[in-house]
Amino acid sequence: MKNPGKMIQFFNTLSGKKEPFHSIQAKKVRLYTCGPTVYDYAHIGNFRAYIFEDLLKRFLLFKGYKVKHVMNITDVDDKTIKKADHEGVSLKQVTDKYIRAFFADIDTLNILRADLYPKATEHIPEMAHMVKALVEKGYAYKKNGSYYFDISKFKDYGKLAKIDRDELKTGERVESDEYDKKNAHDFALWKDKKPGEPFWETEIGPGRPGWHIECSVMSTKYLGQPIDIHCGGVDNIFPHHENEIAQSETYADKKLAHFWLHCHHLIVEGSKMSKSKGNQYTLRDLADQGIDPLVIRYLLLSTHYRKMVNYSDKTLKQSQSSLERIRSFLYELKTRSFAEGENPEVKKWIQDTEKKFTDSLSDDLNISLALTSLFELIREINKLMANQELYHNDVRAVQSSFEKWDQVLGILPKEDEDQLEASIKEKIDQRNKARKEKNYDLADQIRDELLEKGIILEDTKDGVRWKKK
Ligand code: AMP
Ligand code: ZN
């Protein structure tokens, strides 16, 4: 194999160290990422998690893996029910609205879509069935119509969050889906029907699922068990992922996932962005301020996933200027004219950059180093450009490399057909004006620039037409 590059390594929360990554099936990755609870617009802290997962997935695709990606949508839980109640509308009215908003936002942020987005409400019988199986195996029990997982029975309980088993409060129960490590208790798998709350009639009785069971059911149903990688934010480690492990590994007698990857939080001036702190921004808030969504993407992407990202005016400006540097460099390449030929140095620079870029990402997604390698290349190419040592073929090679690397980064705007058409039309207008003013040199220059981009102009009796070379 030609230059395979560095071996991929990821930091596995389960082992607490970096490990070489090997997929279970050759060149195929089964990836599960915990998705949104659709009771409100997602804030950009949530997108920190989704963009880290997007980088992971894009990098695996870049390295030639086929990735099957499933992300659940939590459309019934304490928070969605509370919101519907508060607004006096049905649960579905609330969740449909925020599901639509979620998809619009991930498209705006250039996040690749998952293969499947299963919803909790569409898997109720399967969840009830898993609960029943856990009871039959002796790991779960019923109390006042609700079902709980008995954490004392699962000897590995705490292996992900590193909880000391002696500190476990067994026999005590916790109703709420979210609680801290110090309060590790038997957790709710299924909640009894309550007045005013939606419920489903199932083989284990009426009620609704706890939050954790949906991920165990959907992960196994759509990806099998074990899977290669399971992701989320660090706040998912406990209790959500710990409880998923307890449920799934008891149910199937197999590991749930080989790798557990968690990103650190987005913070605003030192504290976690969250609804309860009132310091959250949605993508819409930022778009209203005229901020380019790809600058937000860059900001969320460019800090290593295991470090905190700080959202502030300063980091926003830094991201804006870094992205601008890449874009204006590419704009220069696109719009300037270059002499025919090539400079052998450029090929070498591109190869070195490609190696640094992929080796950095192979090392637990070291995005900072990967981006640095691109800026180094930009600096070198700019020098050549200034000295007139950059030629037509070099430009093509640099452009296509950036296009390739952007498959991983997703930070460059796609020039779609409409945009292309508009920019050609603008050039034709400029050329017509130049000709009217008898500035034939400028007119010819515009024609040549378009030709460089593969656009041929034809002067016909009905005016100027264009076609692709
Ligand atoms: P939720 O909708 O609250 O279940 O969260 C969806 C995802 O966003 C989970 O993976 C969380 O870990 C993640 N998340 C929530 N808040 C933040 C934050 N401030 N920074 C990074 N990730 C977050
Ligand atoms: Zn989950």
Image (cartoon, helix red, strand yellow):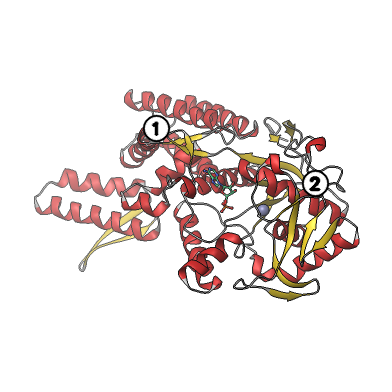
Q: Is residue 220 left or right of residue 261?
A: right
Which element is circle 1 on? loop
Q: Nearer the viewer, residue 59 or 287?
A: 287
Which element is circle 2 on? loop
Q: Residue 178: image x %, image y %?
A: 64, 50
Quickly name the residue at label 2. 24
Find the distance from the CA under tag 1 to the CA under tag 2: 45 Å
- Judge whether 462 appears above or below 332 on screen: below
Quickly name the residue at label 1. 391
* Residue count near mark 1 (Cα–Cα under 10 Å), binned few <14, some 14–19, many ≥20: some
**Residue at image coords 37%, 27%:** 382
Label 2, ligand 2: CB separation under 8 Å? no
- Judge whether 452 appears above or below 142 on screen: above
**Residue at image coords 49%, 73%:** 89
Q: Amino acid at mark 1?
A: Tyr
Q: Nearer the viewer, residue 185 or 18?
A: 185
Q: Residue 350: image x %, image y %?
A: 52, 30
Q: Nearer the viewer, residue 301 or 151?
A: 151
Which image quarter holds the C terminus?
A: bottom left
Looking at the image, how many numbered discs can be counted on the residues?
A: 2
